[in-house]
Amino acid sequence: MPEKSTLIHRIRAKAIPNDPILRIFATATLINTFGNGLFMTVEVIYFTTVVGLSAAKVALALSIAGGVSLLFSIPAGHFADRRGPRDVAVLAYTAEGFVMAGFFFVHSYLPFLLLSVVLGIVGTIGQTMRMAMISKLGAGDERVTIRAYQRSVTNFGIAMGTVFAGISLAINTRAGYQTMMLLDAATFVIASQVFKRLPFVEPTVEKGEPFSFTALKDRKFLGVTVLNGIMSLHFVLQNVAIPLWVVKETNAPRWWVSVIMFVNTIGVILFQVRVSRGSGDIKVGAKLIQRAGFAVAIACLLYALSSGVNVFMACTLLILAMIVHVYGELVGSSGSWSVGFGMADEKHQGQYQGVYQLSWGVGGTLGPSFVTAMAITLGQRGWVYMAIMFAITGTLTHKLVTNKWFANS
């Protein structure tokens, strides 16, 4: 048992920082993401097998919610600059809790669609506020470190929530699934009260000052945002393409998907904070993104090679691919945060973070169809295409950040 104890100790050390502000932020994130893990695990199963909605309708509702929520990212950033992000984030957390509780009463498609849209909107507002809060709590390396802790804690919280949700999956009753939803709702409200303990950050823009849309006029920043959206597709690979690829195109057993994802989760929990150190400078961040592009490209080629080989080789190649992929994820995330915070105008950090969040949102909305077409429809050829895409995207990001290709208006 000593190895297990050592692993748990290391995870705890990474998830619980010493700085009191970081600890408050991490605690709120842990509570919130534990709840998210509960709901994510049972959502589709509950609404398709218990409520009786079709899988296609559930997927459509979630896609619509994701698309609509993107419209609120930039306005939320403006609001963060004018009101201060902490209290708005608290309200967003609380609102998410009440909306989540509303799913308890859903028995048909229209209420599910409407609640999903509202949940997406308040979720986007909350995420933008949290990013704005990070941008205003520190500078340079401090911001990246705070974000790295949030990422590490997020993986840990979701993983624990997923394991706990397995209870409801084993019981497989309406009451069991609904309990998970209500617990998730409660975690939002509890997290809001923890988040409220963070220091208040003064607004950086006067309330009466006209909207400037500075971030939308910053062509260089917009270019980096677009490239970040393309690079973020590697997260969609993990959630969508890789499980399908393992099941449909390799000789690895189905349960190997869990092993692959475990490698990813543990890797992020243990090493995200360490990898992020010293990446506050945007030139360093740009270099990390370039390195991530090549790493993810190599991982794509390894995933492709796992098809058509025996069970042992397939399992080995898939694990090796994920290890390389995790490295790309770690350095790429650190670089992305460095660039996203560092290129922003300090007075309008909230607005800039609202724009930057669009890259993750668009990638998450359009990504599933794209990566499925590449990996499953085109097969090995599609993985090669994606490898080229990631390598080029990382290089272009590095060039754009470190060279004056665009003059800001």
Image (cartoon, grey):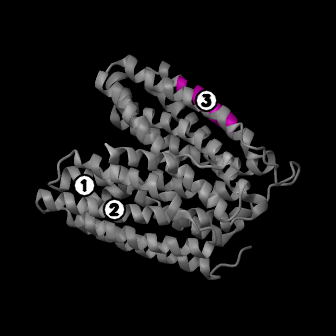
**Separation of residues labelled 1 and 2 (CA atoms):** 17 Å
- Asked whether the residues under the numbered discs 1 and 2 touch, taking CB atoms below 8 Å apart as contact, a structural biologist would say no
Packing grade of label 2 (10 A; few <14, some 14-19, many >=20) is some
**Residue type of the residue flagged with mark 2:** Ile
**Separation of residues labelled 3 and 1 (CA atoms):** 38 Å
Q: Earlier in the sequence, mark 2 or mark 3?
A: 3
**Residue type of the residue flagged with mark 1:** Trp
**Separation of residues labelled 2 and 3 (CA atoms):** 35 Å
- Answer whether residue 5 is magenta in the image: no
Packing grade of label 3 (10 A; few <14, some 14-19, many >=20) is some
- Answer whether residue 98 is magenta in the image: yes
Of the two numbered discs 3 and 1 in the rendering, the one whose residue sits closer to the viewer: 3
Which of the two residues, 73 or 109, is positioned nearer the viewer here? 73
Q: Position of residue 172 (x, y in %)?
A: 31, 22
Q: Earlier in the sequence, mark 1 or mark 2?
A: 1
Looking at the rendering, which quadrant does residue 135 occupy?
A: bottom right
Can you tell which mark lies on residue 245?
A: 1
Relative side of 298 to 88, left or right: left
Looking at the rendering, which quadrant does residue 284 occupy?
A: bottom right
Q: Earlier in the sequence, mark 3 or mark 1?
A: 3
Q: Report the magenta stretch's main SS.
A: helix
Quadrant position of the N terminus in the picture: top left
Q: Position of residue 369 (x, y in %)?
A: 37, 53
Task: For mark 2, give the secondary structure.
Answer: helix
Q: Which residue is mark 3?
A: 190
Relative side of 232 to 194, left or right: left
Q: Position of residue 171 (x, y in %)?
A: 30, 21
Q: Which residue is at 47% across, 60% downward? A: 232
Q: Where are the magenta residues, as a range? A: 90-101
Q: Which residue is mark 2?
A: 323
Of the two numbered discs 1 and 2 in the rendering, the one whose residue sits closer to the viewer: 2
> Would you place residue 188 above or below residue 101 in this image?
below
